[in-house]
Image (cartoon, rainbow, N blue to C red):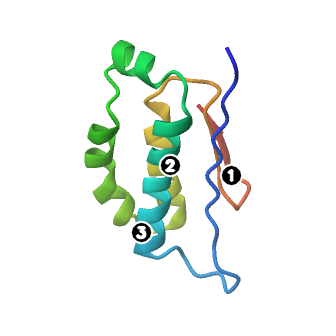
Amino acid sequence: MKSLTLLICLILSASGFALSIEEKEHDFEQLLKLIESDYGPLQFKKDKYGINLDDLRNIHKTRVVNSKTDSLFFYELVKIASQFNDSHFRLTSSDRTSKIL
């Protein structure tokens, strides 16, 4: 099985400000779109684990948007990725924090 690595880079502005709500929403939706379009075993994971992207969107969107720090935002993305039980799924933030799930 071909490995799939998804990279999510949390890009902070040069001045060091945290991500805006709009940026968080965009990154969150971009992650879900990448999973939907590029994650090969999506149907298998749906059948085996009951993973549904709409359910993940509904569960995590409010938490993502309301996250107080970029680290907590990243943690919410990691929780989404962990649902897939896949060691080939990697999230990486701009502060070099990496989570392999």
Mark 2: which secondary structure? helix
Secondary element at tag 1? loop
Count of numbered tags: 3
Give the numbered dot on residue 97.
Answer: 1
Taking 55 as reference, is 20 above or below it? Answer: below
Residue drawn at point x = 32 percent, y = 47 percent: 57
Question: Image quadrant of residue 18?
Answer: bottom right
Quadrant of the frame with the N terminus: top right
Q: Mark 3 points at which residue?
A: 68
- Kindly indicate whether the residue at mark 3 contacts the one at mark 2 (C-beta within 8 angstroms): no
Q: In which quarter of the image is residue 63?
A: bottom left
Q: Earlier in the sequence, mark 1 or mark 2?
A: 2
Residue at horizontal 32 percent and vertical 55 percent from the top:
61
Q: Is mark 3 on a helix, strand or loop?
A: loop
At label 2, the amino acid type is: Leu
What distance separates the C-alpha of mark 2 from that of mark 3?
19 Å
**Amino acid type, mark 1:** Thr
Across and down, in percent, residue 59 comes to 27, 45
- Is 57 in front, or is 62? 57
Q: In front: mark 1 or mark 2?
A: 2
Type of amino acid under label 3: Lys
How far apart are the two marked residues, 1 and 2, measured between alpha carbons?
Answer: 17 Å
Tell me what residue is drawn at x 32 percent, y 31 percent.
52
Among the 4 quarters of the image, the one containing residue 88: top right
Crowding at dot 3, Cα within 10 Å, few <14 / some 14-19 / many 20+, comes out as few
Quadrant including the C terminus: top right
In the picture provided, is 62 more to the left or to the right than 75? left
* Residue closest to the far bottom: 15
Q: Are marks 1 and 3 in contact (CB under 8 Å)?
A: no
Judging by the rendered image, the residue that carries numbered circle 2 is: 31
User: Is 55 situated left or right of 5 in this image?
Assistant: left
